[in-house]
Amino acid sequence: MLSVKEAESIVLNLAQPLDSQQDVETVDLLAASGRILAAPVTGSLDFPYWDNSAMDGYAVRFTDVENCSAEKPAVLEIVEEIPAGYPPQITVQSGQAARIFTGAMMPDGADTVVMQEDTRREGDRIFILVSPEKPQAFVRHKGAFYQAGTPLLTPGTVINAPEIAVLATAQCIQVPVYRRVRVAIFSTGDELISPEQPLASGKLVDSNQYALTVLLAQMGCEVIRLGIIPDNENALKKAIAQAVLTADLVLSTGGVSVGDYDYIEQILADLQGKVHISSVAIKPGKPLTVATFKRDKQASTSPILSSDCLYFGLPGNPVSALVCCWRFVVPALRKIAGLGADAWGPEFVTARCHAELRSHGKRETYVWGKLHLVAGVWEFEPASGSQNSANLINLAHTTGLAVLSASETRISPGEFVEVLKVS
Ligand code: AMP
Ligand code: MG
């Protein structure tokens, strides 16, 4: 059985990033929200676009106002008023000033802005009561924040509000982003029904499909839902064969354990999948199965899919399925999606335990619960009730998974523990 670390490294090696040439689409600025930049963006405009005032005040020549004071003000003639958005018309000469507002273009001749609060106005004359600290005071210079032609945003950047502002400012209104990762999901089990079906004796609602759909959608994936597949070899074979042709990554739940109706691993092999992982020393989640499929380009129904398909056979128990997803699938998806290695995760924090954590030892154990940041220290509160992999009820509100290593059986209240951040 592989350790969690070994499994993680195998999974990350198998996950291949989308292609920065083929797997790119161009979207409108606002549609780029949450997407990942696929190509470098270089602006053709300096920013600020032109010298402009950082204050409401007066544009002056520094040499006219240096050494002035309230007792010995410099007195200047106001020759123009420059609101934001209008180009100046007049060159400021010695002895002159232009009334100027924040964001307005600096007029020729002036090199400094004196803020309004440091002046007194009398008709068309302005009295400068405080000498500016230095020439260029309160002037935002053209190109001070960004020079045209230099790199603006690099590939792998997630486009959120600040990046949208940058792209808008650079007038980059068509944005090259990676296409969404296509993930096919299905659930296996004769016992499964959908939430709207009447509950017959012995049946169970397929919660996994809903949980995974939401997790994947929140990650920006395109989710292809293939429904519930019965514990029937032919039906499973058909579903898997279809899934690996239509998606970059496939997630199935159930059927990977050692029961008589657990067919997945055998079918993966029958369909020429290469099985890389068939169990991991993790609790919950031991039967995790990972395979790859070489893509037969001729047979593919989708010409846009390029690299091989990565298949995760997740255990059926709802907590096991999600723990495996958070620990292994999410980092793989981030790599495939085009994020840089520093963003693949998983993200761990060190937290102080509120209550005792227990494990049987032997397998790396993940205890679910809530993470709180209290006065700068992370605290972990395990979910109350049973830590049973079928107990999806107390999984609600989970924000962290505390990790007990394979050799640890107990962590006392007040001790520190590594916690995987999840959301
Ligand atoms: P399996 O891995 O197929 O042996 O399933 C393990 C346990 O998880 C069984 O109790 C199943 O009923 C349950 N289970 C399997 N698939 C799902 C699902 N999609 N949603 C909720 N529970 C499931
Ligand atoms: Mg099953």
Image: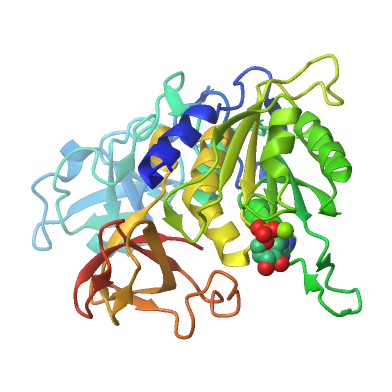
- Where residue 249 sits: x, y (%)? 67, 37
- Where residue 94 sits: x, y (%)? 26, 35
At a point 60% along the width and 79% down the height, the residue shown is 393
| Side of 180 where 400 appears, left or right | left
Q: How is the image coloured?
A: rainbow
Q: 52 and 313: which one is in front?
A: 313
| Side of 119 where 50 appears, left or right | right
* Furthest residue toward right: 198
Examine the rendered structure and indicate whether residue 326 appears above or below residue 336: below
Q: 58 and 93: which one is in front?
A: 58
Q: How many marks?
A: 0
Is residue 168 in view?
no
* Furthest residue toward front: 260
Quarter of the image with the N terminus in it: top left
Q: Quadrant of ligand 1?
A: bottom right
Which quadrant of the view contains residue 60? top left
* Furthest residue toward bottom: 385
- Where residue 335 sits: x, y (%)? 51, 35
Which quadrant of the view contains residue 126? bottom left
At a point 46% along the width and 69% down the height, the residue shown is 399
| Side of 376 where 165 appears, left or right | right
Examine the rendered structure and indicate whether residue 79 appears above or below residue 202: above
- Where residue 282 sits: x, y (%)? 43, 54
Which quadrant of the view contains residue 315? bottom right
Examine the rendered structure and indicate whether residue 271 appears above or below residue 333: above
| Side of 125 where 273 appears, left or right | right
At a point 31% along the width and 36% down the height, the residue shown is 110
